[in-house]
Image: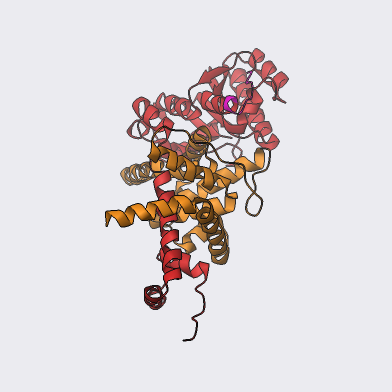
Chain colours: A orange, B red
Amino acid sequence: MRRIFGVAARFRGEVEAQREPLYRLAYSWCHDRSLADDLVQETLLRALDRAGQLNDPQRLRSWLCAILANCLKDHFRRAKPHEPLDDEMAAQGEGPEAASAGAQLAARVRAEVERLPLGQRQVVTLVDLEGFSYAEVGQILEVPVGTVMSRLCRAREALRGRLIDIAAEQNNKVRSIR
Amino acid sequence: MSQQPQVSREMQNAFVDGQLDAADWTAMVERIGTDETLRRQVCELRTVKDMLRGAYADAHPRSFARASNRWSWARVAGFALLFAAAGWLAHAGIQGHGEVAAIMARSGVDLRGVAADRILVHVASSRGEVVDTALQEVEDYLQEAHAAGRKVRVEIVANNTGMDILRADTSAYAKRLERLRAVYPNLTYIACNQTADRLREQGVAVRLLPGVHVAPTALDEIVKRMQQGWVYIRA
Protein backbone atom coordinates (compact mmCIF):
# COMPACT_ATOMS: atom_id res chain seq x y z
CA MET A 1 0.00 0.00 0.00
CA ARG A 2 2.77 2.44 1.01
CA ARG A 3 4.67 1.55 -2.12
CA ILE A 4 1.64 2.19 -4.31
CA PHE A 5 1.00 5.56 -2.73
CA GLY A 6 4.68 6.46 -3.04
CA VAL A 7 4.71 5.66 -6.73
CA ALA A 8 1.45 7.53 -7.32
CA ALA A 9 2.69 10.63 -5.50
CA ARG A 10 5.94 10.67 -7.41
CA PHE A 11 4.09 10.17 -10.68
CA ARG A 12 1.75 13.05 -9.90
CA GLY A 13 4.70 15.29 -9.14
CA GLU A 14 6.44 14.38 -12.36
CA VAL A 15 3.30 14.94 -14.40
CA GLU A 16 2.69 18.25 -12.63
CA ALA A 17 6.10 19.47 -13.73
CA GLN A 18 5.11 18.90 -17.35
CA ARG A 19 1.83 20.77 -17.22
CA GLU A 20 3.19 24.14 -18.33
CA PRO A 21 5.34 22.84 -21.23
CA LEU A 22 2.40 20.72 -22.32
CA TYR A 23 0.21 23.79 -22.44
CA ARG A 24 2.83 25.72 -24.41
CA LEU A 25 3.01 22.89 -26.89
CA ALA A 26 -0.76 22.53 -27.12
CA TYR A 27 -1.12 26.25 -27.68
CA SER A 28 1.54 26.23 -30.39
CA TRP A 29 -0.45 23.51 -32.16
CA CYS A 30 -3.93 25.01 -31.94
CA HIS A 31 -3.36 28.72 -31.13
CA ASP A 32 -6.54 28.67 -29.08
CA ARG A 33 -6.03 29.19 -25.37
CA SER A 34 -9.30 27.59 -24.33
CA LEU A 35 -8.76 24.59 -26.53
CA ALA A 36 -5.18 24.29 -25.28
CA ASP A 37 -6.50 24.27 -21.72
CA ASP A 38 -8.96 21.54 -22.65
CA LEU A 39 -6.32 19.48 -24.41
CA VAL A 40 -3.95 19.66 -21.46
CA GLN A 41 -6.76 18.77 -19.08
CA GLU A 42 -7.66 15.80 -21.23
CA THR A 43 -4.00 14.78 -21.54
CA LEU A 44 -3.66 14.94 -17.79
CA LEU A 45 -6.74 12.82 -17.23
CA ARG A 46 -5.64 10.23 -19.76
CA ALA A 47 -2.12 10.12 -18.29
CA LEU A 48 -3.47 9.50 -14.82
CA ASP A 49 -5.88 6.95 -16.19
CA ARG A 50 -3.11 5.10 -18.01
CA ALA A 51 -0.23 5.58 -15.58
CA GLY A 52 0.46 1.87 -15.67
CA GLN A 53 1.22 2.02 -19.38
CA LEU A 54 4.34 4.11 -18.89
CA ASN A 55 6.99 1.41 -18.69
CA ASP A 56 10.02 3.68 -18.87
CA PRO A 57 9.85 6.74 -16.57
CA GLN A 58 12.56 8.35 -18.68
CA ARG A 59 10.04 8.59 -21.49
CA LEU A 60 7.46 10.54 -19.47
CA ARG A 61 7.78 13.74 -21.52
CA SER A 62 7.50 12.07 -24.89
CA TRP A 63 4.70 9.83 -23.57
CA LEU A 64 2.70 12.86 -22.45
CA CYS A 65 3.34 14.60 -25.76
CA ALA A 66 2.12 11.53 -27.61
CA ILE A 67 -1.07 11.57 -25.51
CA LEU A 68 -1.46 15.28 -26.28
CA ALA A 69 -1.01 14.61 -30.00
CA ASN A 70 -3.71 11.95 -29.82
CA CYS A 71 -6.03 14.30 -27.92
CA LEU A 72 -5.59 16.88 -30.68
CA LYS A 73 -6.13 14.23 -33.33
CA ASP A 74 -9.34 13.19 -31.60
CA HIS A 75 -10.42 16.81 -31.41
CA PHE A 76 -9.92 17.41 -35.12
CA ARG A 77 -11.58 14.12 -35.95
CA ARG A 78 -14.68 15.38 -34.20
CA ALA A 79 -14.44 19.02 -35.21
CA LYS A 80 -15.26 20.51 -38.57
CA PRO A 81 -13.87 21.80 -40.80
CA HIS A 82 -11.02 19.31 -41.06
CA GLU A 83 -7.63 20.66 -40.00
CA PRO A 84 -5.09 20.05 -42.78
CA LEU A 85 -2.35 17.74 -41.58
CA ASP A 86 0.45 18.49 -43.94
CA ASP A 87 0.31 19.69 -47.50
CA GLU A 88 -2.84 21.75 -47.46
CA MET A 89 -2.58 25.34 -46.37
CA ALA A 90 -3.78 26.04 -42.87
CA ALA A 91 -5.85 28.96 -41.71
CA GLN A 92 -4.56 32.50 -41.78
CA GLY A 93 -2.81 33.58 -38.64
CA GLU A 94 -3.88 36.01 -36.00
CA GLY A 95 -3.07 39.69 -36.27
CA PRO A 96 -0.80 41.69 -34.01
CA GLU A 97 -2.28 41.55 -30.55
CA ALA A 98 -0.13 43.57 -28.26
CA ALA A 99 1.33 47.00 -27.97
CA SER A 100 5.00 46.26 -27.25
CA ALA A 101 7.45 45.49 -30.03
CA GLY A 102 8.44 42.22 -28.38
CA ALA A 103 4.85 41.09 -28.08
CA GLN A 104 4.16 42.12 -31.67
CA LEU A 105 7.15 40.13 -32.86
CA ALA A 106 6.00 37.10 -30.87
CA ALA A 107 2.48 37.49 -32.27
CA ARG A 108 3.84 37.67 -35.82
CA VAL A 109 5.92 34.53 -35.33
CA ARG A 110 2.97 32.69 -33.79
CA ALA A 111 0.79 33.78 -36.68
CA GLU A 112 3.28 32.33 -39.13
CA VAL A 113 3.52 29.10 -37.15
CA GLU A 114 -0.27 28.92 -37.18
CA ARG A 115 -0.28 29.17 -40.96
CA LEU A 116 1.80 26.01 -41.22
CA PRO A 117 -0.02 22.74 -41.90
CA LEU A 118 -0.58 20.86 -38.63
CA GLY A 119 1.96 18.11 -39.35
CA GLN A 120 4.72 20.63 -39.93
CA ARG A 121 3.62 22.73 -36.99
CA GLN A 122 3.78 19.77 -34.64
CA VAL A 123 7.21 18.71 -35.79
CA VAL A 124 8.82 22.13 -35.63
CA THR A 125 7.38 22.91 -32.19
CA LEU A 126 8.33 19.53 -30.74
CA VAL A 127 11.89 20.12 -31.92
CA ASP A 128 12.19 23.82 -31.11
CA LEU A 129 10.04 24.22 -28.00
CA GLU A 130 10.60 20.86 -26.37
CA GLY A 131 14.02 19.94 -27.75
CA PHE A 132 13.05 16.43 -28.80
CA SER A 133 15.33 14.52 -31.14
CA TYR A 134 14.01 13.63 -34.58
CA ALA A 135 13.67 10.01 -33.47
CA GLU A 136 11.61 11.01 -30.45
CA VAL A 137 9.37 13.23 -32.56
CA GLY A 138 8.84 10.29 -34.91
CA GLN A 139 7.74 8.15 -31.96
CA ILE A 140 5.44 10.82 -30.56
CA LEU A 141 3.67 11.47 -33.85
CA GLU A 142 3.97 7.87 -35.07
CA VAL A 143 5.69 8.84 -38.31
CA PRO A 144 9.07 7.79 -39.76
CA VAL A 145 12.15 9.92 -39.04
CA GLY A 146 12.37 10.77 -42.74
CA THR A 147 8.90 12.30 -42.54
CA VAL A 148 9.94 14.27 -39.48
CA MET A 149 12.95 15.66 -41.35
CA SER A 150 11.02 16.56 -44.48
CA ARG A 151 8.19 18.22 -42.52
CA LEU A 152 10.71 20.11 -40.42
CA CYS A 153 12.55 21.20 -43.53
CA ARG A 154 9.38 22.53 -45.15
CA ALA A 155 8.26 24.23 -41.94
CA ARG A 156 11.57 25.99 -41.43
CA GLU A 157 11.74 26.97 -45.06
CA ALA A 158 8.28 28.49 -44.88
CA LEU A 159 9.06 30.31 -41.65
CA ARG A 160 12.40 31.50 -42.95
CA GLY A 161 10.78 32.84 -46.10
CA ARG A 162 8.03 34.68 -44.23
CA LEU A 163 10.17 35.93 -41.38
CA ILE A 164 13.37 36.61 -43.29
CA ASP A 165 13.15 40.36 -42.96
CA ILE A 166 12.53 40.18 -39.26
CA ALA A 167 15.27 37.55 -38.95
CA ALA A 168 17.71 39.85 -40.71
CA GLU A 169 16.84 42.65 -38.30
CA GLN A 170 17.45 40.30 -35.41
CA ASN A 171 20.83 39.30 -36.85
CA ASN A 172 21.84 42.92 -37.31
CA LYS A 173 20.93 43.63 -33.72
CA VAL A 174 23.04 40.69 -32.57
CA ARG A 175 25.97 41.82 -34.67
CA SER A 176 25.72 45.38 -33.38
CA ILE A 177 25.70 44.12 -29.83
CA ARG A 178 28.80 42.03 -30.49
CA MET B 1 38.78 25.59 -57.76
CA SER B 2 36.07 22.95 -57.92
CA GLN B 3 32.69 23.96 -56.55
CA GLN B 4 31.63 22.06 -53.44
CA PRO B 5 28.28 20.25 -53.53
CA GLN B 6 25.44 22.07 -51.81
CA VAL B 7 24.64 21.09 -48.27
CA SER B 8 21.02 19.95 -48.17
CA ARG B 9 18.42 21.76 -46.11
CA GLU B 10 17.86 18.58 -44.12
CA MET B 11 21.55 18.57 -43.23
CA GLN B 12 21.45 22.23 -42.26
CA ASN B 13 18.46 21.65 -40.02
CA ALA B 14 20.08 18.62 -38.43
CA PHE B 15 23.14 20.74 -37.70
CA VAL B 16 21.08 23.50 -36.11
CA ASP B 17 19.14 20.94 -34.06
CA GLY B 18 22.23 19.06 -32.87
CA GLN B 19 21.17 15.90 -34.66
CA LEU B 20 24.41 15.20 -36.53
CA ASP B 21 26.97 12.70 -35.34
CA ALA B 22 30.45 13.96 -34.46
CA ALA B 23 31.98 13.37 -37.90
CA ASP B 24 29.19 15.11 -39.82
CA TRP B 25 29.10 17.94 -37.31
CA THR B 26 32.84 18.54 -37.69
CA ALA B 27 32.54 18.46 -41.47
CA MET B 28 29.71 21.00 -41.32
CA VAL B 29 31.68 23.34 -39.09
CA GLU B 30 34.64 23.21 -41.47
CA ARG B 31 32.37 23.86 -44.44
CA ILE B 32 30.63 26.77 -42.75
CA GLY B 33 34.05 28.31 -42.19
CA THR B 34 34.64 28.53 -45.93
CA ASP B 35 31.14 28.88 -47.36
CA GLU B 36 29.57 32.29 -46.81
CA THR B 37 26.20 31.26 -48.26
CA LEU B 38 25.95 28.21 -46.05
CA ARG B 39 26.93 30.29 -43.04
CA ARG B 40 24.13 32.75 -43.78
CA GLN B 41 21.58 29.99 -44.33
CA VAL B 42 22.49 28.24 -41.10
CA CYS B 43 22.43 31.52 -39.27
CA GLU B 44 18.92 32.23 -40.58
CA LEU B 45 17.71 28.80 -39.53
CA ARG B 46 19.17 29.33 -36.09
CA THR B 47 17.48 32.72 -35.84
CA VAL B 48 14.11 31.32 -36.92
CA LYS B 49 14.47 28.56 -34.34
CA ASP B 50 15.21 31.11 -31.61
CA MET B 51 12.33 33.32 -32.71
CA LEU B 52 9.92 30.41 -32.49
CA ARG B 53 11.13 29.54 -29.01
CA GLY B 54 10.73 33.14 -27.89
CA ALA B 55 7.26 33.43 -29.38
CA TYR B 56 5.78 30.95 -26.91
CA ALA B 57 7.80 31.86 -23.85
CA ASP B 58 4.84 33.63 -22.26
CA ALA B 59 2.24 30.99 -23.06
CA HIS B 60 0.92 29.88 -19.70
CA PRO B 61 -2.17 27.81 -19.01
CA ARG B 62 -5.01 30.08 -17.92
CA SER B 63 -6.66 27.42 -15.87
CA PHE B 64 -3.37 26.51 -14.17
CA ALA B 65 -3.05 29.67 -12.11
CA ARG B 66 -6.78 29.71 -11.43
CA ALA B 67 -7.06 26.07 -10.60
CA SER B 68 -3.98 25.94 -8.45
CA ASN B 69 -5.75 28.11 -5.89
CA ARG B 70 -8.77 25.85 -5.77
CA TRP B 71 -7.13 22.51 -5.80
CA SER B 72 -3.61 21.28 -5.81
CA TRP B 73 -2.13 17.97 -6.76
CA ALA B 74 -1.63 17.30 -3.10
CA ARG B 75 -5.36 17.72 -2.52
CA VAL B 76 -6.17 15.06 -5.04
CA ALA B 77 -4.25 12.35 -3.24
CA GLY B 78 -5.41 9.04 -4.53
CA PHE B 79 -6.59 10.60 -7.79
CA ALA B 80 -4.37 8.46 -9.98
CA LEU B 81 -5.03 5.46 -7.83
CA LEU B 82 -8.75 5.82 -8.16
CA PHE B 83 -8.50 6.35 -11.90
CA ALA B 84 -6.53 3.17 -12.14
CA ALA B 85 -8.79 1.37 -9.73
CA ALA B 86 -12.24 2.35 -10.86
CA GLY B 87 -12.16 2.58 -14.63
CA TRP B 88 -15.41 2.42 -16.50
CA LEU B 89 -17.62 -0.50 -15.65
CA ALA B 90 -18.01 -1.52 -19.22
CA HIS B 91 -14.34 -1.11 -20.09
CA ALA B 92 -13.40 -3.39 -17.27
CA GLY B 93 -16.08 -5.82 -18.27
CA ILE B 94 -17.73 -5.18 -14.97
CA GLN B 95 -21.43 -4.70 -14.38
CA GLY B 96 -22.90 -3.13 -11.32
CA HIS B 97 -21.95 -1.30 -8.20
CA GLY B 98 -20.76 -4.26 -6.18
CA GLU B 99 -18.12 -5.03 -8.76
CA VAL B 100 -16.76 -1.49 -8.64
CA ALA B 101 -16.30 -1.93 -4.94
CA ALA B 102 -14.54 -5.20 -5.61
CA ILE B 103 -12.06 -3.75 -8.05
CA MET B 104 -11.28 -0.89 -5.70
CA ALA B 105 -10.83 -3.29 -2.83
CA ARG B 106 -8.29 -5.25 -4.83
CA SER B 107 -6.34 -2.03 -5.29
CA GLY B 108 -6.07 -1.56 -1.57
CA VAL B 109 -8.48 1.34 -1.06
CA ASP B 110 -10.33 1.26 2.27
CA LEU B 111 -13.96 0.94 1.28
CA ARG B 112 -15.15 2.00 4.71
CA GLY B 113 -13.88 5.46 3.85
CA VAL B 114 -15.44 5.51 0.43
CA ALA B 115 -19.08 6.31 -0.09
CA ALA B 116 -19.54 3.91 -2.96
CA ASP B 117 -23.15 4.92 -3.27
CA ARG B 118 -22.08 8.20 -4.82
CA ILE B 119 -20.83 7.87 -8.35
CA LEU B 120 -19.60 10.42 -10.86
CA VAL B 121 -19.70 9.39 -14.50
CA HIS B 122 -17.47 11.49 -16.75
CA VAL B 123 -18.59 11.73 -20.37
CA ALA B 124 -15.95 13.41 -22.57
CA SER B 125 -17.12 12.07 -25.90
CA SER B 126 -20.34 12.30 -27.86
CA ARG B 127 -19.69 9.01 -29.63
CA GLY B 128 -22.88 7.00 -29.65
CA GLU B 129 -21.42 3.82 -28.21
CA VAL B 130 -19.80 5.71 -25.36
CA VAL B 131 -22.92 7.66 -24.42
CA ASP B 132 -25.27 4.70 -24.91
CA THR B 133 -23.14 2.49 -22.70
CA ALA B 134 -22.81 5.16 -20.04
CA LEU B 135 -26.52 5.91 -19.90
CA GLN B 136 -27.44 2.24 -19.89
CA GLU B 137 -25.02 1.52 -17.06
CA VAL B 138 -26.30 4.49 -15.07
CA GLU B 139 -29.91 3.45 -15.57
CA ASP B 140 -29.19 -0.15 -14.58
CA TYR B 141 -27.30 1.02 -11.53
CA LEU B 142 -30.05 3.39 -10.42
CA GLN B 143 -32.73 0.79 -11.05
CA GLU B 144 -30.87 -1.83 -9.06
CA ALA B 145 -30.27 0.58 -6.18
CA HIS B 146 -33.90 1.68 -6.17
CA ALA B 147 -35.10 -1.93 -6.11
CA ALA B 148 -32.78 -2.68 -3.20
CA GLY B 149 -33.91 0.42 -1.31
CA ARG B 150 -30.42 1.91 -1.34
CA LYS B 151 -30.01 5.68 -1.37
CA VAL B 152 -27.50 6.50 -4.06
CA ARG B 153 -26.47 9.62 -5.99
CA VAL B 154 -25.14 9.79 -9.51
CA GLU B 155 -23.66 12.73 -11.35
CA ILE B 156 -23.03 12.74 -15.07
CA VAL B 157 -20.30 15.29 -15.81
CA ALA B 158 -19.83 16.17 -19.46
CA ASN B 159 -17.09 18.11 -21.23
CA ASN B 160 -15.43 18.30 -24.65
CA THR B 161 -17.77 16.79 -27.22
CA GLY B 162 -19.51 14.94 -24.41
CA MET B 163 -21.19 18.29 -23.73
CA ASP B 164 -23.29 17.73 -26.82
CA ILE B 165 -25.56 15.40 -24.89
CA LEU B 166 -26.45 18.17 -22.45
CA ARG B 167 -27.00 20.87 -25.08
CA ALA B 168 -30.57 21.59 -26.16
CA ASP B 169 -29.50 22.21 -29.75
CA THR B 170 -27.32 19.13 -30.20
CA SER B 171 -28.46 16.43 -27.82
CA ALA B 172 -29.76 13.22 -29.31
CA TYR B 173 -30.49 12.06 -25.77
CA ALA B 174 -32.67 14.91 -24.48
CA LYS B 175 -35.80 12.79 -23.97
CA ARG B 176 -33.90 9.92 -22.43
CA LEU B 177 -32.07 12.23 -20.03
CA GLU B 178 -35.31 13.94 -19.10
CA ARG B 179 -37.01 10.61 -18.46
CA LEU B 180 -34.14 9.37 -16.31
CA ARG B 181 -34.12 12.59 -14.34
CA ALA B 182 -37.87 12.36 -13.78
CA VAL B 183 -37.64 8.78 -12.53
CA TYR B 184 -34.46 9.27 -10.51
CA PRO B 185 -34.24 12.70 -8.80
CA ASN B 186 -30.92 11.55 -7.35
CA LEU B 187 -29.38 11.83 -10.81
CA THR B 188 -27.69 15.15 -11.69
CA TYR B 189 -26.26 16.46 -14.93
CA ILE B 190 -23.24 18.78 -14.86
CA ALA B 191 -21.86 20.70 -17.83
CA CYS B 192 -18.29 21.99 -18.06
CA ASN B 193 -18.18 25.78 -18.30
CA GLN B 194 -14.71 25.72 -19.84
CA THR B 195 -16.06 23.75 -22.76
CA ALA B 196 -19.05 26.08 -22.96
CA ASP B 197 -16.72 29.10 -23.03
CA ARG B 198 -14.74 27.57 -25.85
CA LEU B 199 -17.91 26.95 -27.83
CA ARG B 200 -19.05 30.52 -27.23
CA GLU B 201 -15.70 31.81 -28.47
CA GLN B 202 -16.39 29.86 -31.64
CA GLY B 203 -19.69 31.68 -32.00
CA VAL B 204 -21.85 28.83 -30.77
CA ALA B 205 -24.86 29.83 -28.68
CA VAL B 206 -24.75 27.26 -25.92
CA ARG B 207 -28.19 26.32 -24.59
CA LEU B 208 -28.28 23.58 -22.01
CA LEU B 209 -31.11 21.19 -21.36
CA PRO B 210 -33.43 22.10 -18.49
CA GLY B 211 -32.04 21.15 -15.10
CA VAL B 212 -28.43 20.88 -16.18
CA HIS B 213 -25.99 22.41 -13.69
CA VAL B 214 -22.70 24.04 -14.59
CA ALA B 215 -19.25 23.50 -13.03
CA PRO B 216 -16.23 25.77 -13.74
CA THR B 217 -14.42 22.84 -15.32
CA ALA B 218 -15.08 19.11 -15.51
CA LEU B 219 -11.79 18.49 -13.77
CA ASP B 220 -12.78 20.75 -10.87
CA GLU B 221 -16.03 18.86 -10.40
CA ILE B 222 -14.30 15.49 -10.60
CA VAL B 223 -11.67 16.47 -8.06
CA LYS B 224 -14.27 17.98 -5.72
CA ARG B 225 -16.42 14.88 -5.81
CA MET B 226 -13.53 12.51 -5.39
CA GLN B 227 -12.41 14.45 -2.35
CA GLN B 228 -15.91 13.94 -0.99
CA GLY B 229 -15.52 10.21 -1.47
CA TRP B 230 -17.36 9.77 -4.73
CA VAL B 231 -16.32 7.02 -7.11
CA TYR B 232 -15.09 8.29 -10.45
CA ILE B 233 -15.97 6.43 -13.61
CA ARG B 234 -14.86 7.53 -17.06
CA ALA B 235 -17.20 6.68 -19.89
Residue B205 painted magenta? yes
**Residue A101 seen in this snapshot:** yes
Q: Name the residue rendered at 64%, 44% in the picture.
A: A83
Question: What is the quadrant of the C terminus of chain A in the image?
Answer: bottom left
Is A46 left, or right, of B28 in this rendering? right
Q: Residue A167, relative to residue B122: is it above or below?
A: below
Residue A64 lies, in percent from the top left, at 46, 48
Residue B5 lies, in percent from the top left, at 51, 79
Viewer-closest of A19 and A44:
A19
Which image quadrant is residue B68 in? Answer: top left
Residue A11 painted magenta? no
- Seen as rendered, the residue at the extreme left is A178
Q: Residue B215, relative to residue A106: is it above or below?
A: above
Magenta region: which residues?
B200-208
Q: Main secondary structure of the magenta part?
A: loop
**Residue B152 seen in this snapshot:** no
Residue B211 lies, in percent from the top left, at 60, 13
Viewer-closest of A97 and B78:
A97
Viewer-closest of B3 and B19:
B3
- Seen as rendered, the residue at the extreme bottom is B1
Is B204 left, or right, of B100 in this rendering? right
Viewer-closest of B149 and A71:
A71
Q: Name the residue rendered at 46%, 86% in the picture.
A: B1
Question: What is the quadrant of the N terminus of chain A in the image?
Answer: top left
Q: How many marks?
A: 0
Q: Name the residue rendered at 55%, 21% in the picture.
A: B190
Residue A130 lies, in percent from the top left, at 42, 52
